[in-house]
Image: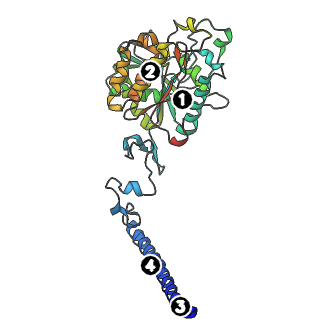
Amino acid sequence: MSSAASAPNQQQDSRKSSVTVLSLLTLVVAILIALFLGYTANTSNSGNLFGLKRLLPASWGAASLSSGARRPLGSAAGVDRAQNIQKIPGIDEFKMRTPVYFLSHGGPNIMYEVDHPAYKQLTKIGREITSKVQPRAVVVFSAHWQAGTDTIQVNTAEITDLIYDFYGFPSHYYKEKYPNVGSKEIATKVLDALGEAGIKAEGVKRGLDHGVWASFKCAFEPDSNPLNVPVVQVSLFKTEDPMQHYRLGQAVSKLRDENILIVVSGMAVHNLRDLQFTWGDPRPLPYTVSFDEALKDAVVTPPAERAKAMADLLKRGDARQAHPTFDHLLPIHIGAGAAGDDLGKRLWTLKEGSMSWAQYRFGEVANASSSL
């Protein structure tokens, strides 16, 4: 009886095995056909990879699927921001526009306070710039250089000394060195960009002030992480007009398409008058906290509304407490203007007494997953 019952079972198992083998053969044949169709299609249209173009959204053109292109990093909701990438002649890949950095630079003493969190953060930013951004030149705006009310000055010197624009520090501060070179070529590009935007500008020969070289010495330590590219400093206007400085940033934004990095150097909160009341006490004053957060909110505002949000900062009730004069705040308005359609991001902050060390970046770097 058991022998008779097993015969139908064996026949059923045999049929299942045959169906499985047939299914596998069908799958293999389908794959081979798809590969063949994809190959023949690619010979005439590199965008129709494996014949699947018809299955993709219309926004995925040939460039999106070809092996020589990649989606730019930093895209929102998967939407390409083609204006933020550039094709480098002779290199078969796309390169994003350089980002824009705002550095809170503090006083010259930060050079020696290697255990201070701000020193360490400036060092991280410097390494991101040298290892990932890799610009061919740096154009920098510092709070410590204001030119005319309607005129910008650009340093055209190729051999640039240091300016020791601080008082009451130990004598060795005034012997500090920071190796650097300027560039007439880059300075001319800045002057041309300003002229095209209708901004009066003139070339001058000047040294680097401590808003540049002291912070750069932390970020680009000459022995361990040298910058090794030209540095061209540009002035601010001698005004407290936020939109005037925002437009200044817009005027030089085009330099980012030529692998030129824009750095703006100031301080997120900067009240030297109250420093005496917080000496030895790192707890932030109330206005340090409130204004630091308001600045972050303005910077991360969508680009279409960012200019107004940045300008409104100067109208806040705590603005004159956070910045008795706006010279250390206005550089970030230049940076926001230079950012164009790129989003702003606070990389890090430290609220300390009557100061904030917040550091910002507009835009992304090529390796965003491992950036700050």
Q: Nearer the viewer, mark 2 or mark 1?
A: 2
Left or right of 172, for residue 356: left
Q: Are marks 2 and 3 in contact (CB under 8 Å)?
A: no
Q: Nearer the viewer, mark 2 or mark 3?
A: 3
Q: Residue at x 61, y 24 (%)?
A: 117
Q: Which mark is residue 20?
A: none
Instruction: Give the quarter of the image for residue 118.
Output: top right
Q: Is residue 86 above or below residue 291?
A: below
N-term mark: 3 or 1: 3
Residue located beneath label 4 in the image: 26
Q: Residues within 10 Å of mark 2 (few under 14, many from 20)?
A: many
Q: CA distance from mark 1 to mark 4?
A: 63 Å
Please tell me which residue lies in front, 47 or 180.
47
- The amino acid beneath tag 2 is Pro
Pick the quarter of the image with the N terminus. bottom right
Q: Of helix, strand and loop, which one carries label 2?
A: helix
Q: Which mark is residue 331?
A: 2
Q: Is residue 265 above or below residue 90?
A: above
Left or right of 272, for residue 51: left
N-term mark: 2 or 4: 4
- The amino acid beneath tag 3 is Ala
- The amino acid beneath tag 1 is Pro
Q: Nearer the viewer, mark 3 or mark 1?
A: 3
Name the residue furthest front: 1
Q: CA distance from mark 2 to mark 1?
A: 20 Å
N-term mark: 4 or 3: 3
Q: CA distance from mark 3 to mark 1?
A: 90 Å
Residue located beneath label 1 in the image: 230
N-term mark: 2 or 1: 1
Residue located beneath label 3 in the image: 5
